[in-house]
Image (tube, helix red, strand yellow):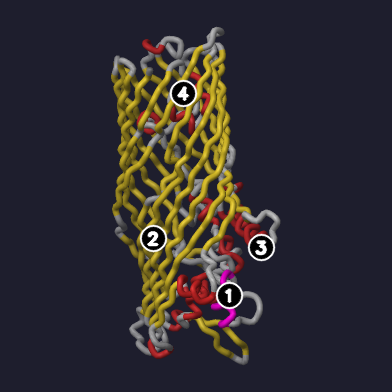
Amino acid sequence: MIIMKRLIVFIGILVCHRLTAQLPEDALRVSWTTPSGTAREQAIGGAMGSLGGEISSNFVNPAGLGFYRTREIVLSPGWQLLQNKASYLNTNNSGYTASHFNLGVSGFVTGHTGYNGNNSVFSIAVNRTANFNQHISYEGLNSYSSGAEQYAEEFAYGSEPNIDKAIGTPGLYSYGTREALYTYLIDTATVNGQLQVIAQPQKAGLLKQQNDLRTRGGITEIALNLATGIAGKWFIGGGIGIPILSYTREQTYREVDASGNTNNDFQSYTYTEKYTSKGFGLNAKLGLIFAPTNAVRLGLAIHTPSVIGVSDKIHSSMNTNLEAYSVPQQVTSDQLDATYGPANTVNYNLYTPWRFIASGSYLFGGGEQDIKSQKGFITADVEYVTTKSSHFKPANTDGSDGSDSYYNAVNSSIKSIYKNYLGLRLGSEMKFDTWFARLGAAYYTNPYQDSKELKADKLFLTTGGGWRDAGMFVDLAFVACISRDVNFPYLLSDKNNVVSSLKQLSGTLLLTVGFKF
C-alpha cells in the first residue's frame, strides 16, 4: 500500500543526522501496552480497577491492595504462542510463528488490621508490563521508490555534499548513509550543471523488496505500594514503579533488481542492523476505591509517566552489487568505527504517557463484608492513555551537544502522528463453593491519527478458572488476542511512503499459584 504520510517524515531529513535515530514508533512501542497480571486478572480481561483484593492491583489501581487483611505470596508463570502475518504492496506474506516464556504478576502482599478496624497493607511485586517478542517478514514488488532514497535524502540535506567528510565523520550521518556512500549505493553526479545525489536502485525501475524484523525483550516493572482500607468503604493506595527496559531489534532489508536488465548499474543491496536499547526508570501510581455498599465498588487510578534513562547501541553492515558501476562492496559499522572512531552509542531520556483509569464493579452475594457468601461479580474498566504526551529529551540537559532541535522535531512528530487512545475492559466471575469460572474481554483503540489509512487495534478474549481453599489458590487463564498494526520499511520526505499492514494472532496460557498465611 502506498499512502501519503508526510506528517510522519517531516522529521525525516533531520532525524537521519542522529546515530540511532529515535523515531515516533519508539515512543509508541512503550505506550501502546496492555495490562498483564495474574491468571485471575487476565481471565477477566484485565479489569482490575475497582475490584481489589488481588496482587495485580499493584499495576492497575494500588487502592485495591487495601482489601487485604492477611499475607500472600504469588507466582504467575506463563507461555505465549504468536503468529504474525503481513501484507505489503498487494502481496500477502504468511509470517512466522514463535513461542516464549512470559511472567505475570508475582510477589508478596502483607495486610494488617489495626485496633480501629482499618487496614494497612504493603506489597512488592514484579510484572512483565510490555512484551516485544515478535518476528515480522514481508516482501513485494515496488516500481515507485527505493529504501536507498532515504540515504540519498540525508546526504543531500544541508551544505554541498562531501563524500569523504560524510564517511569519515562519526555521528554526522547515520551508519546506513555512511555505508551507502562507502559501497557506492548512493553517489554524486553532475546533472545539467548541478551536483545531485543519486540512489543506484532507482535505475532499475522495478525492485523486489524484502524486510525481515526480529524483536525481543520487554519492560519488567518492580512495584512497591502502600494501601489502607478505612471503615470498609474507602480504600487508598499508591507507590512507585521501577521499569526495566530491554529491547533488541535485528533487521535484514534487501532490494533486488526485478527488471531483468543486467546493465543498469544495480543488481542488489542488503542492509543488516542490530539495535539494542536498555534502561531503567521511575513512575508513580495512585488510586482510590469507594464502596458505598457491600455490592458496589467504584475506582479511580492515575499512572504518572515513566521517566526512563535509555542507552542505545547499533551495529550494521551493507553489501551491494552494482554490476559494472563498481565491484561488489561490503562494509560494517565496526569497520567504520575502527577507522574513523566509534559512534555507536547514544543516551537519552524517554517519557511514557499518562494513564487514567475509571472502573466499577458489582458483586453478587455478601460483598466485601461476607466473602464466603459471595457468588461472583461483573466489573469494567475504562482507561485513557495520553499517547501524544510521550516524548524524548537529551541526556545532556544543557543542550551542549546540539540535540535539542532533533528531539523537538521527533516530539512534534509524535503529536502529529498519534492520538490518545482508550482501553475498554470487561470481566466476570462466578463462584461455585471452592471453584471459580471466569470470562472477559478487552479492546484497545487505534493510536494513529490517520485511522482510515493506518489500521491498528487490539482485541482480547479471555477465559479461565480457579480453585482456592485452606489458604491456597490455583488459577488458570487463556488469553486470545487479535492485533493489527503497520510497519514502514523506510521513510521518505519527498514522496508518498509504502507501508506494510500487520496482523498478529496470539494465545497466552497463564498459571498462578498463591498461598495465604
Q: Residue 136 carries which label?
A: none
Q: Marks 1 and 3, Cα distance to the nearest angstrom?
A: 15 Å
Examine the rendered structure and indicate whether residue 146 appears above or below residue 385. Answer: below
Taking the magenta stretch, the answer to whether it contains residue 168 is yes
Residue 406 in percent (x, y) is at 63, 62
Tags 4 and 2 touching, CB below 8 Å: no
Q: What element carries label 1?
A: loop
Give how far across and how far down residue 327 sits, in percent. 39, 87
Q: Nearer the viewer, residue 491 or 248?
A: 248
Distance from Cα at disc 2 to Cα at disc 1: 29 Å
Mark 3 surroundings: few (<14), some (14-19) or many (≥20) residues within 10 A: few
Q: What residue type is labelled 2?
A: Leu
Which residue shows up at 56% across the image and 47% down it?
308
The three-letter amino acid code for the residue at tag 1 is Thr
Whole-number angstrom distance, CA of label 4 to CA of label 3: 49 Å
Q: Say left or right for 497 vs 75.
A: right
Q: Pointer 3: what residue?
A: 401
Query: Tag 2 or tag 4, which sits nearer the N-term?
Result: 4
Classify residue 95 by image quadrant: bottom left
Residue 169 badge:
1
Of mark 3 and mark 2, the one earlier in the sequence is: 2
Q: Which of marks 4 and 1 is nearer the N terminus?
A: 4
Query: Mostly what secondary structure, the magenta segment?
Result: helix
Q: Mark 2 points at which residue?
A: 213
* Mark 4: amino acid: Leu
The residue lying at 34 percent from left, 56 percent from top is 85
C-alpha distance separating marks 3 and 2: 31 Å
Q: What residue type is labelled 3?
A: Asp
Report the residue marked by disc 4: 51
Alpha carbon of mark 4 to alpha carbon of mark 2: how far? 40 Å
